[in-house]
Structures are given as C-alpha cells and as structure tokens.
Image (cartoon, helix red, strand yellow):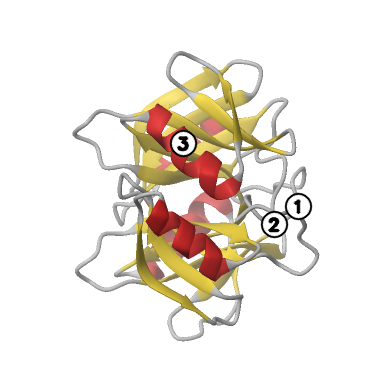
C-alpha cells in the first residue's frame, strides 16, 4: 500500500477493530505485533508501533461479531456520504468528529461489506505501513466482484487492471490501492485486512498460542508467505511476509 502520508481518494488508510473486550484485544495484539496502546475516548485505544499510530480498537456490543473495519480516505466526507447513498450503499453512522484527528463515517456497500470513510485533519491515517506489525494491504471480497468494482469506481473513481482469476488490482490516482475479488457464495462480502510480519509461520504459531486460530496457510503466494487467521474473538485478518525493505522485529 502507499506509504503513510500519501493517501489518495479511496485508498485504505486506517483500520479499526471492533470487539466487546478491548482489554483482551490489547493483550492479544500487543503480544502478536508488539503494539503499545494510547487511551483515547472512554473504552477506546489507539495502537502504536515505534510511536506511530497504526490502528484503533473500539468496543462493540456483545451481539456484534468482532471485525476489522477498513477505512477509505476521502477529501470531502460529506460528498462521499452522498455518493455512497446514491450508488446503493448505506450509511450506518453519520459523519462524526474524532478529536484532534479528523472526521469519519461508517457505511455498508451494496454487497453488504461494512467499511469506514476517513477525512483526516490533521491525521491522514496510519502513520506507519508495510513494516512488520503494521497494515500492508486490504482487499474487498464478495460473491459479485463486478458489482463491487462498479460501486467503488462510482464512489471513489477507482481504475482497474485487467482481472486475473477474478481478482483485480484497484488503482487510485494511478497507484495501487487495494484488491477486489471473488469469495465463495456461502460467505458474506467483506473487506479483509492484511498485516505485515517478519515471519509468517512464527506469527501464525503465536496466534494459536494466544487463543486465536489459523484458517488457512501459512503458504507461499505471489505476494509473500501468507496465512488467514482469527484472533481470540474470531476477528479475521491476514498475516503476510513483510515487503522488501520492511524493518522491525515484531511478529
């Protein structure tokens, strides 16, 4: 993904974990990714790595499934909200202020995938990416990737490379932004968060030791050795070998 500070319109720029037990989440991800945590509003924390903000954890009701929510950058939040509604999406939380950071809103696309909108001011998004223990990629998976491509092109102006095996690289301002592809028809649409790791196999073992589970992998992929995992509250994410040039000693 683009380096922090260069978040064009529609680029995944921030991720938020929603789950009922924020304290347990801090234990899990602190041990897995060597994150530190800074309390923000009551019950919420921002995770940091080398002093840079990398993610947030916020409480959810016990009835809500734990999940990582991808937030997409937008220059004009109000305009993006209008476009989401105009093209078949829903706004599930109206624009709100995040003190000292920016404005956000929550949405669901026409395929049923939740996502966030983020207008940073002054915080553009993750302050550190593409290194072990930080965000490195996001992809949208659904039973109808053509419909997903149409929606996100209309809302954010994505351009697309030619599909390969149903998967497409989406571009924002000509630069790689995210992936869009198919998922088994029995699964609901979702945005999937990828975190970089120095050693995918070791990190997958650590997930298990911390009470999570490994759904597939680790295995070699064109993008690095990867594993699909769940944390100890069943929130899914992907571990992937850090891109060349990444640094650090976290999982």
Q: Is residue 210 above or below residue 141?
A: above
State yes or no: discs 1 and 3 in contact (Cβ < 8 Å): no
Dot 2 falls on a residue whose secondary structure is loop
Residue 82 seen anywhere in this rendered image of the structure: no
The residue tagged 3 is: 27
C-alpha gap between disc 2 and disc 3 = 22 Å
Is the residue marked by circle 2 packed among few (<14), some (14-19), or many (20+) residues within 10 Å? many
Lower sequence index among marks 1 and 3? 1
Dot 1 falls on a residue whose secondary structure is loop
Q: Is residue 67 above or below residue 228?
A: above
Indicate the quadrant where residue 251 lies: bottom right
Q: Which mark is residue 130?
A: 2
> Which is more toward the observer, 209 or 242?
209
> Which is more toward the observer, 3 or 102?
3
C-alpha gap between disc 1 and disc 3 = 27 Å
Lower sequence index among marks 2 and 3? 3
Dot 3 falls on a residue whose secondary structure is helix
Task: Classify residue 18 as left or right of residue 101.
Answer: left
C-alpha gap between disc 2 and disc 1 = 8 Å
Q: Is residue 234 above or below residue 146?
A: above
Residue name at image x 61 percent, y 76 percent: 223
The residue tagged 1 is: 3
Residue 175 seen anywhere in this rendered image of the structure: yes
Q: Is residue 39 above or below residue 84?
A: above
């Amino acid at each position: 993904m683009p380096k922090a500070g260069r978040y064009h319109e529609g680029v995944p720029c921030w991720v938020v974990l929603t789950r009922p037990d924020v304290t347990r989440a801090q234990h899990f991800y602190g041990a897995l990714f060597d994150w530190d945590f800074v309390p923000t509003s009551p019950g919420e924390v921002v995770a940091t790595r080398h002093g840079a903000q990398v993610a947030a954890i916020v409480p959810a009701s016990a009835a809500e499934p734990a999940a990582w929510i991808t937030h997409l950058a937008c220059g004009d939040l109000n305009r993006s909200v209008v476009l989401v509604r105009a093209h078949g999406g829903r706004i599930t939380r109206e624009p709100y202020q995040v003190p000292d950071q920016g404005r956000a809103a929550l949405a669901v696309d026409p395929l049923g995938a939740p996502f966030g909108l983020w207008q940073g001011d002054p915080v553009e998004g993750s302050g550190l990416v593409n290194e072990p223990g930080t965000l490195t990629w996001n992809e949208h998976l659904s039973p109808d990737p053509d419909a997903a491509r149409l929606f996100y092109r209309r809302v954010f102006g994505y351009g697309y490379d030619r599909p390969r095996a149903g998967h497409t690289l989406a571009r924002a301002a000509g630069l790689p932004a995210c992936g869009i592809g198919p998922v088994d028809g029995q699964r609901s649409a979702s945005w999937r968060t990828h975190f970089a790791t120095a050693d995918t196999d070791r990190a997958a073992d650590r997930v298990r030791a911390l009470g999570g589970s490994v759904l597939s992998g680790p295995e070699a992929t064109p993008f690095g050795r990867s594993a699909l995992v769940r944390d100890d509250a069943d929130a899914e994410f992907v571990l992937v070998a850090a891109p060349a040039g990444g640094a650090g000693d976290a999982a």
